[in-house]
Image (cartoon, helix red, strand yellow):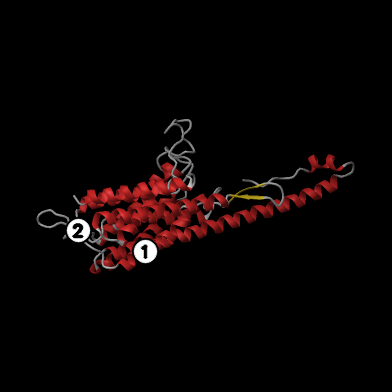
Amino acid sequence: MAAETCSALALAPLLGANSTAAAQYLCSQFDTVSLQLTDAKSAIDSTYLLFSAYLVFAMQLGFAMLCAGSVRAKNTMNIMLTNVIDAAAGGLFYYLFGFAFAFGAPSNPFIGRHFFGLKDVPAPGFDYSYFLYQWAFAIAAAGITSGSIAERTQFVAYLIYSSFLTGFVYPIVSHWIWSADGWASAARSAPHGLLFGSGVIDFAGSGVVHMVGGIAGLWGALIEGPRIGRFDHGGRSVALRGHSATLVVLGTFLLWFGWYGFNPGSFITILNSYGPIGSIHGQWSAVGRTAVTTTLAGCSAALTTLFVKRLQTGHWTVTDVCNGLLGGFAAITSGCSVVDPWAAVICGFVSAWVLIGFNKLAEN
């Protein structure tokens, strides 16, 4: 939002006769303060977005620890390497192509076509901090898949997959939903009547990030098949336990921590407007509310998983609880900014049953 400007011609009659000079002085002071407020708003918003990007990036360490603890010890180095590659290859390919495909407006409804290699950035509406935040999202989408195809993927194949997903697949999907030009974007859907005129509203990426990573992981698992030893000769499921519950719990808490950048950070700005001199209006209450709904959904899903798995197996299982917790976070991500806290609890409860049901289905 542009700062308000002062008109000396409009102000002079209010100050009485021979007051043009005074009006010009007051206007100069007003414009100076407005410019300072603009600079302060930009600095605060950029700092908030960068901090959120750092939190989301910390999720890569969470993915690495979670996956490392969930596989057998002999495959630890390989799975951790894939998570490093997600960040490194994803950074380069998202810089060269991904950001342009996602947010290169003006463009067509399918794919962006500007800002390749960050050419012409900064641009009106965003700066480098916005690129960094979106890159952290892109590599998170790639990281979701690594666990689905763990222990049975050649390194070169994973390198190609990671580069392709972060540089092409994920950016196109995010363009559809989050770019103002996207065919499913809420910003352009009203004239077209998509989804009753509302468009696709995905605040922080339940679909754009988690569903893209999940579908990629599903296809990878279907193509590669089960891990060696997952089923016995009679076709019965064999549990393959990870070698370290400690790493699983560490990774889960790191992901929980990073989710506070993922969901609340998706507001992009924390100061949304300013009015008269000295009056700045923020959306910090909405940011706090989003953090609360995120927390409650995860907690509800974790406890639901805990007791359901206890009834099923007769044991308290920490790895199942961790998976349930993360499932609750993924489920609330889309609507975290608008649902009531009590609704977030229900969302987490339902997500736990979905997770348990699909885990059971995967065993058959």
> Residue under circle 2?
227
Q: Nearer the viewer, residue 202 or 308?
A: 308
Q: Going 30% across and 53% down the picture, which residue do you hit?
A: 308
Q: Going 88% across and 41% down the picture, which residue do you hit?
A: 16
Classify 139 as above or below 203.
Answer: below
Q: Quadrant of residue 183?
A: top left
**First along the sequence among labels 2 and 1:** 2
User: For this view, does 41 lie left or right of residue 144?
Assistant: right
Q: Which secondary structure, mark 1? A: helix
Give amino acid for label 2. Arg
Across and down, in percent, residue 119 comes to 49, 52
> Residue under circle 1?
251
Determine whether label 2 and label 1 are within 8 Å by CB.
Answer: no
Q: Total of numbered circles in the picture?
A: 2
Classify 43 as above or below 27.
Answer: below
Q: Quadrant of residue 79?
A: bottom left
Q: Going 41% across and 42% down the picture, which residue do you hit?
A: 176
